[in-house]
Amino acid sequence: MIRTGSGERRVSLAEYRREEEAAVERGEPWVHVAAVEGPELSLGVSQPEEEACAVRARQQGIPVERRSSGGSAVLLEAGDWAWSVVLRRADPRVGRDFARAYARFGLGVTRALGSVGVAAAWAAPRGISETLCLLGPRGSVLEASDRVVGGCAQHLTATTLLHHGVLIRTLDRGRLSQLFDISPEILTRHLASLDEVGVGRLTTRALATQIGAALGIPVEAGV
């Protein structure tokens, strides 16, 4: 773990996943947000280790981590946000519609962006790529200025729901193009970073607070 000069907490994906796993084991309501050290590649639970993007990432010295949820790969650059919500499976906040409740679980994210003047909404997936999750065919994506700036996924155990997502604060389209074999033109048309849409004043703590408030979950003091 490192902290930037502004005090922002940055962690590796491996450390962040360990924190998530511990929270799922505890099974208590939990909200957490951190910026990642990056660049790092997150694979979906069912993607093979030899997925082409993972092979290319390792060749470039980029760490590859596997998450417990579905979907496909996400490249996180330094400073991008990872956020997580944990609820007991029987908690009424999970609801019978949890498999389609991306906008409900991500309401705090859209409120946080709105607080700094960025209009964002959870929308249908683009269905452009089978390997790049933010342009994939499943789930839901976060859009701002008509482009994708984040995504989310879920993992359900016998007792607990983990709902987690990413927010892209910076975007290296050249690296994305190399890893996923997608033209820079398509990436420019469909993806944007939060920095590009003007989210500079939002802090990690403010984002976590909004996510927790929308779901009625206290936020860790150390965020």
Image: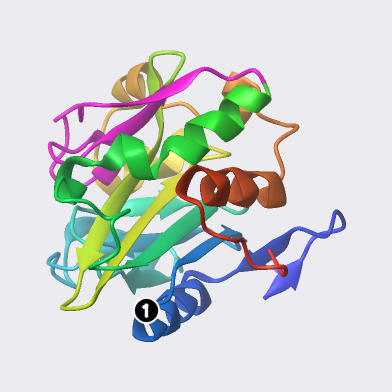
Work out whether 41 lies above or below 215: below
**Left or right: 129, with 207 as reference point:** left
Q: Is residue 123 in view from this perspective?
A: yes
Image position of 119 with respect to 207: above or below: above
Determine which quarter of the picture holds residue 140: top left
What residue lies at 12% left-to-right and 67% top-to-bottom?
46
Report the magenta stretch's main SS. Answer: loop
Q: How is the image coloured?
A: rainbow
Looking at the rendered image, the quarter that the C terminus falls into is bottom right
Occupied quadrant, residue 87: bottom left
Which residue is nearer to you in this view: 101 or 193? Answer: 101
Q: Is residue 74 magenta?
A: no
The disc labelled 1 sits on which kind of residue? Gly
Q: Position of residue 169 (x, y in %)?
A: 57, 39
Against 46, is 97 above or below?
Answer: above
Residue drawn at 53 percent across, 47 percent down: 211
The image quadrant of residue 117 is: top right
Mark 1 packing: few (<14 Cα in 10 Å), some, or many (20+)? some
What segment carries the magenta color? 117-143
Q: Residue 73: x and y, percent?
A: 27, 54
Q: Which residue shows up at 19% across the image and 73% down it?
A: 49
